[in-house]
Image (cartoon, helix red, strand yellow):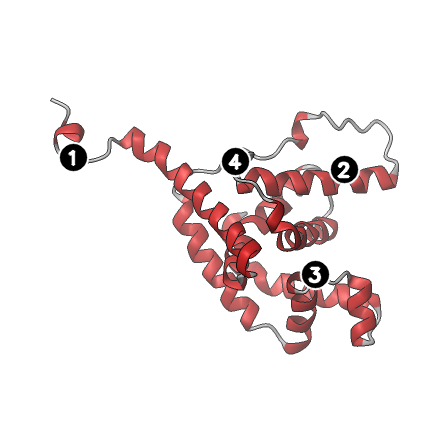
Amino acid sequence: MNRDRTSGETPQGDKQQAAPEKLAAEMAELVVAIAEHEDRTAFARLFGYYAPRVKSYLRRLRVDERLAEDIAQEVMLTVWRKAAQFDSSKASAGTWIFTIARNRFIDRVRREKRPGFDETDPMLQPEAPRPADEAMAGTEIGARVHAALTDLPPDQAQVVELSFLEGLPHSAIAERLGIPLGTVKSRLRLAFARLRPALEDLR
């Protein structure tokens, strides 16, 4: 007799199958919350889950540490700006976000005119879904990222808000604040570094 069936419990295989679907649904809901309500808590959770994964993906493509951080920030900024373009009937949130990352990487390579670059290289394909038990971890880390964002020094918090939440390009932030462009980028890197303790779990 199958105890799982007679006891009314979900068989282990079904649990393993359902959990990735639950995680995908949760991530999709976060994108929708950003699109419809500019929900900063949702963005913090999404950022906490995907920013380190995007960076890790780029590092595997041999992008150096600093550039990988810059591109990861650009990707998450695009997620904030273009969340309304996300269509869960066409792709999962993860696939959509990693496609943005792939496109950003390809744009960089094209600008550098790197010879011998193959856009069809399997290494460029979006990452496969992670283990199902990361759903709860993603929620916990998202909460930690949100707390870290609220604990940033005022100058760093200001550029993060202007960049990620108001969607201003770095040059516009520099102009508005009357500071050099390099200072804007430096403050964003410092802010990202302060978030790193909350993101280390996902490396």
Query: Could you tell whether 13 is left or right of 116 in the image?
Result: left
Query: Could you tell whether 200 is left or right of 158 in the image?
Result: left
Q: Nearer the viewer, mark 3 or mark 4?
A: 4
Q: How far apart are marks 4 and 1 (CA)?
A: 31 Å
Q: Which of marks 1 and 3 is nearer the N terminus?
A: 1
* The N terminus lies in quadrant: top left
- The residue labelled by disc 1 is 8
User: In the displayed structure, would residue 179 be above or below residue 198?
Assistant: below
Q: Distance between the residues labelled 1 and 3?
A: 49 Å
- The residue labelled by disc 2 is 106
The amino acid type found where label 3 is placed reads Gly
- The residue labelled by disc 4 is 89
Where disc 1 sits, the SS reads loop
**Residue at left offset 53%, top offset 55%:** 48
- The residue labelled by disc 3 is 167
Taking the view exactly as shown, the residue that stands out farthest to the top is: 1
The amino acid type found where label 2 is placed reads Ile
